[in-house]
Amino acid sequence: MRMNAAARILEQYAALQPHAPAADAAAQQLAALGLPDSRDEQWRYANLRALDGIADFRPGRGGQPNAAPAARALPEPLPDHLRLVLVDGRFDAALSCPPAALSAAGVGLARSTNPGPAGATSGPLQLLTRMFAAETLTLVCSADARLELCCIATAGNAAGYPTLDVQLAPDATLQLVERHLGGAQRASLPGQLVCASTRLTLAANATLRHYRLQEYGAGVLWLDNQDARLARDARLILCQIGVGAATARHTAHIALAGERAELHWQAMAVANGRQVNDTWVRVDPLARGTVTQQRFRGIAADQARVACSAELKVGGAGAGARVQQNLRGLIDGRGAEVDLRPRLEIRTDDIQASHGATTGQLDETLLFYLLSRGLDPATARTLLKWAFLGDVLGEITVPALRRVAEQAAAGQLADVLASGAMS
């Protein structure tokens, strides 16, 4: 009889040597907690059965990244950005910019073998990172910098644990483009796990513009955990685009710890076939006068599922907060499903708040209009989907990256867009 996923994880961890004390503590926690299931509201829409398809939870063997396939998978570099590369969760110095270039840009880089940052979202699945991650990459920005981080998964059964700790000094400004690529391309292959963990710490008056584009292959299970903490007058602009992986789960906790801290969060997920894309994000305004803007756009086609749960809790310490939540989903297919849950818990009278969620199908009136103008049905439906995503894609201010994100979304929507019909 095959062991369940939790038992296999613990058995494979036990076979690894040596063990760090923090990793052992994480393993003990996992043994006590077990893996989450759909009865847990936080994991209600996640495809946790995908864990049963993962044969090997251990990271790739050896201390060197698999550079040859990673180099082939690397996209064209972004103009005016310094590039860093992680291959199967390990930093690859040969494919990254020289340390001197980072220093000149006011960025410090450090690698450590600790099991990664533990943040507020530390739950059963983030414990995997603390058990198996080969290293943590720490970036400390003290000036005005632009970085491109490419996380490459090579096509194999070994798991990858890209682990990142980003720290912004007071008054620092960082534009960070994070791309996740590669991995098993066919869903028929044994499942491949990529479990990412990111911690963001913004000091007073720091600004981080963070773009994240996930386009892993169809044989990948992507588990993503993100924690952020913002000090006084700090500003985080976060744009997340999810189009890849067979199953993707993004978990985030963002603490607005300082007065007048601002979060501008937008996310987009496009899924087709039998893909599952689940997002759970919690924001805690912990100080006066904070600003939170959340926008989500999701499209599910064929038999895919897209879900987004956005939670925000404002206590008395968060008086004067301004909150906007706007979640929208589009269903295109009898077997498709979109689940949206905006949730506000307010314990103060001094607040400006609005929230809403809508899910529907393509507008038949607009579709009829496009058909009457001579467009074929497939093209007309694709154009309406494209327009639905426009307000999130429009938030990408890097022209080269916006083109990449548009092409990735186009590949999910229809071949007509990829062929240049939108130009």
Image (spheres, rainbow, N blue to C red):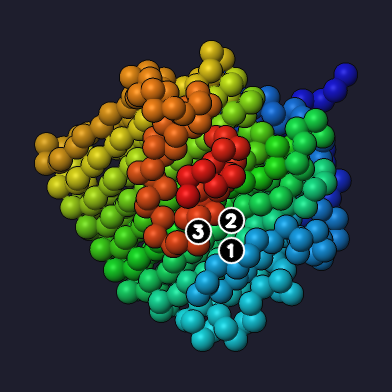
Q: Which residue is under mark 2?
A: 179
Vertical order, 352 against 39 (above or below):
below
Vertical order, 173 against 392 (above or below):
below
Q: Is residue 91 visible?
A: yes
Amino acid type, callout 2: Arg
Q: Earlier in the sequence, mark 2 or mark 3?
A: 2
The structure residue drawn at horizontal position 39% and vertical position 22%, both measured from the top left corner, is: 372
Q: Are marks 2 and 1 in contact (CB under 8 Å)?
A: yes
Q: Which residue is under mark 1?
A: 149
For disc 1, the neighbor class at 10 Å (few under 14, some 14 to 19, many from 20) is some
Foreground of the two, 57 or 176 = 176
Residue 166's x, y, as percent? 50, 64
Q: Residue furthest left?
A: 350
Nearer mark to the viewer, of 2 and 3: 3
For disc 3, the neighbor class at 10 Å (few under 14, some 14 to 19, many from 20) is some
Vertical order, 178 against 390 (above or below):
below
Foreground of the two, 133 or 220 = 220
Q: Which residue is under mark 3?
A: 401
For disc 2, the neighbor class at 10 Å (few under 14, some 14 to 19, many from 20) is many
The structure residue drawn at horizontal position 63% and vertical position 33%, both measured from the top left corner, is: 247
> Helix or strand or loop: what does disc 1 sit on?
strand
